[in-house]
Image: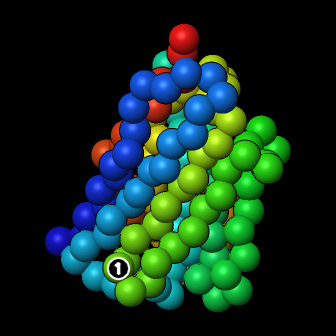
Amino acid sequence: QVQLVESGGGLVQPGASLRLSCAASGRNFSNNAMAWFRQSPGKEREFVTAISATTGSAYYADSVKGRFTISRDGAKNTVHLQMSNLKRADTGDYYCAAREGGMASMKTEMYEYWGQGTQVTVSR
């Protein structure tokens, strides 16, 4: 059974940093694109960042460029999201996703596997 399990969320103040992790089990995702999406109350799930397996290229939403970094550890079947200079607008549930293809996508419908999410709250 394939599982993606996120961890690392929490309550932080604006300007702080957090590192989210996504541990995959049930199969090896080293040849699959993986991504992070987030969802705030009352809003649709939105793309945050993704990393391709074929090229290793990373893609970011404009709102997080320069502040967030996605990385993957193939040996540990894990993807990380390093978030710095967090803003209140970054508050939401963060979801890890994986797709069957090796090329990253910004579209939720392109990802077949999803985690349950980890909550990030940025507030004083």
Farthest residue, direction top: 124
Q: Nearer the viewer, residue 104 or 73?
A: 73
Relative to 50, 9 lies left or right: left
How does the figure colour the protein chain or chains?
A: rainbow
Residue at 49 percent across and 61 percent down: it is 80
- Residue 99, x across and y down, in percent: 49, 71
Mark 1, residues whose alpha carbon is within 10 Å: few (<14), some, or many (≥20)? few
- Residue 66, x across and y down, in percent: 79, 50
Q: Is residue 67 visible?
A: yes
Residue 73 higher or lower than 119, as above or below: below
Q: Which residue is mark 1?
A: 76
Residue at 63 percent across and 70 percent down: it is 51
- Residue 83, x across and y down, in percent: 60, 46
Q: Quadrant of residue 124?
A: top right
Dot 1 amino acid type: Lys
Residue at 46 percent across and 78 percent down: it is 73
Residue at 38 percent across and 86 percent down: it is 75
Residue 78 higher or lower than 47, as above or below: below
Determine whether the residue tagged by mark 1 lies in a helix, strand or loop.
helix
Query: Quarter holding the N terminus?
Result: bottom left
Q: Nearer the viewer, residue 12 or 64?
A: 12
- Residue 108, x across and y down, in percent: 56, 52
Residue 81 higher or lower than 1, as above or below: above
- How many marks do you count on the picture? 1
Relative to 24, 41 lies left or right: right
Relative to 6, 89 lies left or right: right
Q: Is residue 112 visible?
A: no
